[in-house]
Image (cartoon, rainbow, N blue to C red):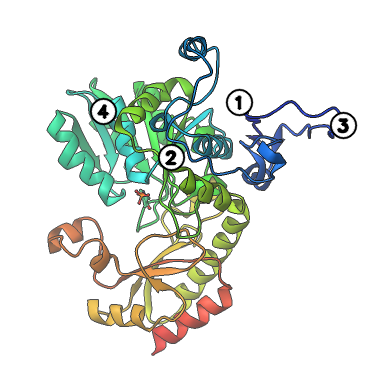
Amino acid sequence: MENAIIVENPSTAKPPREDSPAQPKVKRAGLSTTSVHAGEARRKPSDAITDSICCSSTFTFESTQSIIDYIQQKQDREEYGRYGNPNEKVVERKLAALDSAEDAIIYSSGMAAIVGLLIAKLSAGDEIVIFDQCYHRSREFCAKHLSRFGIVTHQVETGNYAAMDAAINERTKLLISESPTNPHLSVIDLEQFVDLGKSHQVETLIDATLATPYNIRPIEFGVDYVWHSATKYMGGHNDLLAGVICGSKEKLECVRKMRGILGGINSPHNMYLLERGLKTFALRMERHNENGQRVAEFLEAHPRVERVYYPGLKSHPSHEVAKRTMKGFGGLITFLVRDADWKQTADIIDACTIPKIAPSLGGVESLIEQPYVMSYFDYSPEDRKRFGISDNMIRMACGIEDSADLIADLKQALEA
Ligand SMILES: *Cc1c(COP(=O)(O)O)cnc(C)c1O
């Protein structure tokens, strides 16, 4: 989008040769230009076009004085692998640029990122308020584990801003929501969410994994922290795990320091894969959005389908909010099979020949699963009901295949 800024890498960019062409003067590039170029040095070692994988667990100093210069922040350089590596830094700059954020901290998984942020920011006696439709492991971490350290979590109904308002008190430190949520694809009104935080002077965090910065840009709405599982659309190829927190340098300073202690960093190889995946990020998102919309429309018109959850459909309760806040609606679709029990629902999944049966989303390959079996099998029927997980629910993550093929495959599976 217009606001992404191409960032040069000051630490590794050598000055251009006298005969080298002028640098492009673009300061506000589009999302595709940003995903290809942002965060990378114009000239790299050996004049390579790609960033080389820098395998080094530690980094050498020329002299004792250069250690002192580094400690006194006169030199921007690496120190020891747990504090980051050059491949991570390129990806961090690229992800910050994509989200119009000042800074981004990369972790070895999405969960490592949220845990890293919460541990760095919260202390005993603090409280947080979260919307209840959120990634089940973040809900579990807050409810079962933060509580062990004296941190209280209030869960309120997703999209109920009055309930969130009522749950805030002088101990509240953070408001958390996913947008869109999984698997119901509810979209949060970011203006209301941010207003709520600002009026109580409480920070806000959005898990924008399902939207990505292609479809939603929470920082531009005034959200303090944006969290993504980069395992999904950002990596995009179902071949890596990573997570990222974006925000201001000042607010993330203590989070970065905590990461150096927790140690959930990424190997240079993993970061090379993520950097490579990000090159096609905007292109892939265009296709995910297109496939999501087409498959959702097909499903909604099919007699065996009882209901489709997709924010790009007029029938979705969040459609108006989604149109106001999102550029596209992503590749994830949830639907209910008419008059089907869990086994008849499973039979449809088993009859598909293109989408593979797996958890996750956001990769080039389409994936399909039954939330009841995949993520909620050990929940009580009451708890499944509370989280809106019905036996006849299917979640499909559209990849980048041809939508006509995905539709033909779903049609034969529904009609088998
Ligand atoms: C996958 C996912 C996560 C967790 O990320 P990992 O990379 O699997 O740790 C968090 N939030 C959402 C919405 C996700 O889809």
Q: Mark 4 falls on what kind of element?
A: loop
Callout 2 touching callout 4 (CB < 8 Å): no
Dot 2 corresponds to which residue? 244
Instruction: Check disc 1 and give the amino acid type.
Output: Ser
Crowding at mark 3 (Cα within 10 Å: few <14, some 14-19, many 20+): few
| Horizontal side, residue 216 vs residue 9: left or right | left
Quadrant into which the C terminus falls: bottom left
Residue 334 vs residue 17, the one in the foreground = 17
Crowding at mark 4 (Cα within 10 Å: few <14, some 14-19, many 20+): many
Q: Residue at x 45, y 86 (%)?
A: 412
The image quadrant of residue 199 is top left
Dot 4 corresponds to which residue? 168
Residue 398 vs residue 87, the one in the foreground = 87
Callout in the foreground (3, 2): 3
Structural distance between the alpha carbons of marks 3 and 2: 38 Å
Dot 3 corresponds to which residue? 19
The image quadrant of residue 142 is top left
Dot 1 corresponds to which residue? 11
